[in-house]
């Protein structure tokens, strides 16, 4: 069965302390892996789509990478405004209309 | 920028009431989705629609129905609200079958 596991569940960083979030997945025929940011009480905000192993995408302090089994969201020199829950989702070939979401990593960046 | 709007940010309803949640997207997207999000359970798909007047059940359709009369609008209906339907409801849309979904701000529904 297709599934997504994110780790850690929660991460506390000091401002400027770089780190990575992990998204491990099992899916039959990956069609896309998606990263979202979600602030409390709001809807997820789309960040990146990755389609194939080796692909990388960057946006400001965030960089997403993809292998055949997992994706990483690297956060370089984070700021307090990067505090949020980061969600990972995959879309497979067995059911195009379904996204499998992970449970998220709650990131807290302290000034 | 893609914009998905939902009719209410917060809603309080009584048990047994019929509840309508409205979602509108302005990017001419083919596909629209309704999810609910609960602590510890993550996002769960209720229904989706890939065309006007077309709908498909997601993982948890029981107690819900949907309507899509126009391409830009997708409504979620709770026929008889129950307390276990208290949740955050999220609407999303996507341009094609394969690809990212864009979410609305969410509606926090409380059923008392």
Image: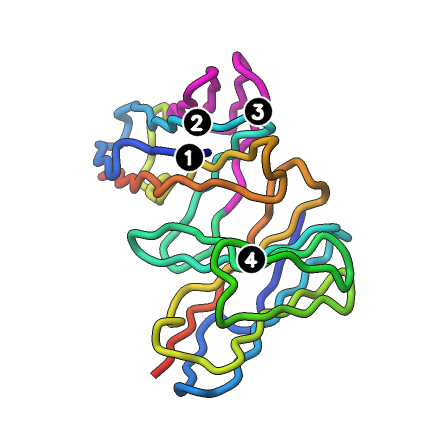
Which residue is at the front of the view, A3 or B11?
A3
The segment highlighted magenta reads: A45-74
Tell if the residue under mark 3 belongs to the same chain as the one under mark 1. Answer: yes
Where does the image place residue A28, in percent across and percent down from the top left?
A: 53, 26
Which residue is at the front of the view, A25 or A37?
A25
Residue B53 located left or right of residue A108: right
Look at the image and say whether residue A55 sits in the magenta stretch.
yes
Asked where in the image residue A17 lies, by quadrant, the reply is top left
Note whether A90 is above or below B31 in the view shown. Answer: above
Q: How far apart are marks 3 and 1 (CA)?
A: 12 Å
Pointer 3 residue: A29
Kindly identify which chain the residue marked by label 3 belongs to. A
Note whether B63 is above or below B88 in the view shown. Answer: below
Q: Residue at x 47, y 19 (%)?
A: A65
Asked where in the image residue A96 lies, by quadrant, the reply is top right
Total number of numbered labels? Answer: 4
Q: What element carries label 3?
A: loop
Q: What element carries label 2?
A: strand
Kindly identify which numbered label has been placed on residue B2: none
Kindly identify which numbered label has been placed on residue A3: 1
Task: For marks 4 and 1, give the one nearer the viewer.
Answer: 1
Q: Is mark 4 on a helix, strand or loop?
A: loop
Packing grade of label 3 (10 A; few <14, some 14-19, many >=20) is: few
Kindly identify which numbered label has been placed on residue A26: 2
Q: Do the residues labelled 2 and 1 touch (CB within 8 Å)?
A: yes
Task: For marks 4 and 2, give the one nearer the viewer.
Answer: 2
Packing grade of label 2 (10 A; few <14, some 14-19, many >=20) is: some
């Amino acid at each position: 069965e297709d599934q997504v596991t994110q780790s850690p569940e929660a991460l506390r960083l000091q401002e400027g302390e770089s780190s990575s979030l992990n998204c491990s997945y099992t899916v039959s025929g990956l069609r896309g892996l998606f990263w979202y940011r979600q602030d409390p009480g709001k809807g997820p905000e789309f960040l990146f789509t990755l389609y194939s192993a080796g692909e990388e995408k960057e946006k400001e302090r965030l960089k997403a990478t993809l292998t055949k089994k997992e994706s990483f969201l690297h956060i370089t020199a984070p700021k307090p405004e990067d505090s949020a829950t980061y969600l990972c989702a995959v879309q497979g070939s067995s059911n195009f209309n379904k996204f499998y979401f992970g449970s998220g990593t709650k990131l807290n960046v302290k000034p | 920028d893609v914009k998905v709007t939902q009719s209410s940010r917060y809603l309080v309803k009584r048990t047994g009431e019929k509840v309508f949640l409205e979602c509108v997207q302005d990017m001419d997207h083919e596909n629209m989705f309704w999810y609910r999000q609960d602590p510890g359970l993550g996002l769960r798909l209720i229904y989706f629609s890939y065309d006007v007047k077309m709908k498909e059940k997601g993982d948890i359709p029981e107690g819900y129905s949907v309507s899509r009369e126009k391409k830009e609008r997708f409504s979620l209906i709770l026929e008889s609200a129950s307390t276990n339907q208290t949740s955050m409801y999220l609407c999303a849309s996507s341009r094609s079958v394969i690809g990212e979904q864009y979410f609305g701000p969410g509606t926090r529904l409380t059923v008392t």
